[in-house]
């Protein structure tokens, strides 16, 4: 092909074409270099594990451990530890439940039954930045406690079980996972939604009949009429966890306080609810929280010893002793305004749960 014989516009087209091919080649080689680079890097990084699901369940916590300061993720052992920590928290029944080889928990709940999305969901008591907020004063024990001791608080109450040895591999793995969840947040700083949604409780006692109506309408589909939920096939755990009965949290658990349960429920239930768009009103959450907590559940031994300084006891703690004269019934189901007023006048304490 003699370029000179081509008309000007064809020459221009041809030049353009060659230019484009050049660009395509450039892009191709650049792509190739990138691919080789990714391959080389990924070959050497200790398995970023089969964690595609991670990004999905914890959207605000991407799988990017480079910025993380406290855990040495280039150490394969650490990486495995974090992955195991996540499993312990999401598949607790299989690892620590009563039918597992290390039966520390007394029920078949998972930590993630309440700390939703593996402890990543805002307003479901997420674990993000939690380890760096410890040691912390705890009224229940009336002393400074470590993160390990706090985890054991849930082991003995929410999980109705025994404390894990503080130095155990299981304990370290759970803490490492919580640290990992927090990698990109300032240490010690609380994230938005670090506990539960707050609610304004009505100035009346729980209406159990209304609570039952709400339960039938919004909860029963998954947790079933008898509150026993539904087992997960091939696991010790549940697809829909029980809300009362022998395999539920015990009477010393935070979820057994009507106000705490109402806060959790408002921001998180029915499943899929977020704190931005709660389905239930405060009154509905309050009544249904009373309803699920009106049934029998395991009894925590020695619960009387909780809150040595009784004034620090949350007012909806349903078991005594208290430093007031209100009835056990009123502590369990309200009305709470009178109790809150009493503590404010008598002790200068503001109580919201
Ligand atoms: C039945 C529900 C339930 C289960 C199951 C449960 N927890 Fe909790 N957990 C709670 C509640 C309620 C709180 C208190 C939140 C608050 O302070 O308002 C809590 C608090 C915590 C805290 C302190 C959070 C903070 O912000 O200070 C940690 C850590 C924790 N749980 C770990 C665990 C671990 C680990 C497991 C599993 C072994 C577990 N929990 C199982 C309900 C549960
Ligand atoms: C669409 C199914 C579904 C509906 C409807 C639903 N839940 Fe749940 N609920 C779940 C699942 C699933 C979990 C555990 C989350 C996990 O394991 O990821 C849960 C956890 C809970 C927990 C904490 C764990 C436990 O066993 O104590 C409580 C309390 C709870 N739900 C109460 C309610 C209440 C009250 C309602 C109605 C207002 C409700 N749920 C409606 C699916 C549902």
Image (tube, helix red, strand yellow):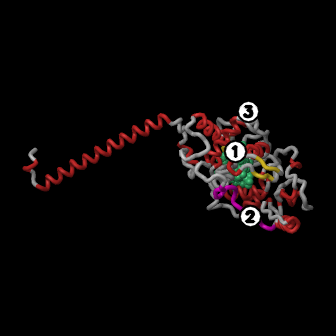
Q: CA distance from mark 2 to mark 3?
A: 41 Å
Q: Secondary structure at mark 3?
A: loop
Label 2 sits on residue = 283
User: How packed is label 1: few (under 14 Cα within 10 Å), some, or many (20 or more)?
Assistant: many
Residue 172 visible to the viewer = yes
Mark 2 lies within 8 Å of ligand 2 (Cβ measured)? no
The residue carrying mark 1 is 111
| Residue 180 lies in quadrant | top right
Residue 116, relative to residue 161: is it above or below? below
Which stretch did the figure color magenta?
Answer: 189-203
Relative depth, front residue between 210 and 316: 316
Sequence-first disc among 3 and 1: 3
- Most extreme residue toward the front is 69
Q: Residue 25 vs residue 301: left or right?
A: left
Disc 3 crowd, CA 10 A, few/some/many (<14, 14-19, 20+): few
Q: Nearer the viewer, mark 2 or mark 3?
A: 3
């Amino acid at each position: 092909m003699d370029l000179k014989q081509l008309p000007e516009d064809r020459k221009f087209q041809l030049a353009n074409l060659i230019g484009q091919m050049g660009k395509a080649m450039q892009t191709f080689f650049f792509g190739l270099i990138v691919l080789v680079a990714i391959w080389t890097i990924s070959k050497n990084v200790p398995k970023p594990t089969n964690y595609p699901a991670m990004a999905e369940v914890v959207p605000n916590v991407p799988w990017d451990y480079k910025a993380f300061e406290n855990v040495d993720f280039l150490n394969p052992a650490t990486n495995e530890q974090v992955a195991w920590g996540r499993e312990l928290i999401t598949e607790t029944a299989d690892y620590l439940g009563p039918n597992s080889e290390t039966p520390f928990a007394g029920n078949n709940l998972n930590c993630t039954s309440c700390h939703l999305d593996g402890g990543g969901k805002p307003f479901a008591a997420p674990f993000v930045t939690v380890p760096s907020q410890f040691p912390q004063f705890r009224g229940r024990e009336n002393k400074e406690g470590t993160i390990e001791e706090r985890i054991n608080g849930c082991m003995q109450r929410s999980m109705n079980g025994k404390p894990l040895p503080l130095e155990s591999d299981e304990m370290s793995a759970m803490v490492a996972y919580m640290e990992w969840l927090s990698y990109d947040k300032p240490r010690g700083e609380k994230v938005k939604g670090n506990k539960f949604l707050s609610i304004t409780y009505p100035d009346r006692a729980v209406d159990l009949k209304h609570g039952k109506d709400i339960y039938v309408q919004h909860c029963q589909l998954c947790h079933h009429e008898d509150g026993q939920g539904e087992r997960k096939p091939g696991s010790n755990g549940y697809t829909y966890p029980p809300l009362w009965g022998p395999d539920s949290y015990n009477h010393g658990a935070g979820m057994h306080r009507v106000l705490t349960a109402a806060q959790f429920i408002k921001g998180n239930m029915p499943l899929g609810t977020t704190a931005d768009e709660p389905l239930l009103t405060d009154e509905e959450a309050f009544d249904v929280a009373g309803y699920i907590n009106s049934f029998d559940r395991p009894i925590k031994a020695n619960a009387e010893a909780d809150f040595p300084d009784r004034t620090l006891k949350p007012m909806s703690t349903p078991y005594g002793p208290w430093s007031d004269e209100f009835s056990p019934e009123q502590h369990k189901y309200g009305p709470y305004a009178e109790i809150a007023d009493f503590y404010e006048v008598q002790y200068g304490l503001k109580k919201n749960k």
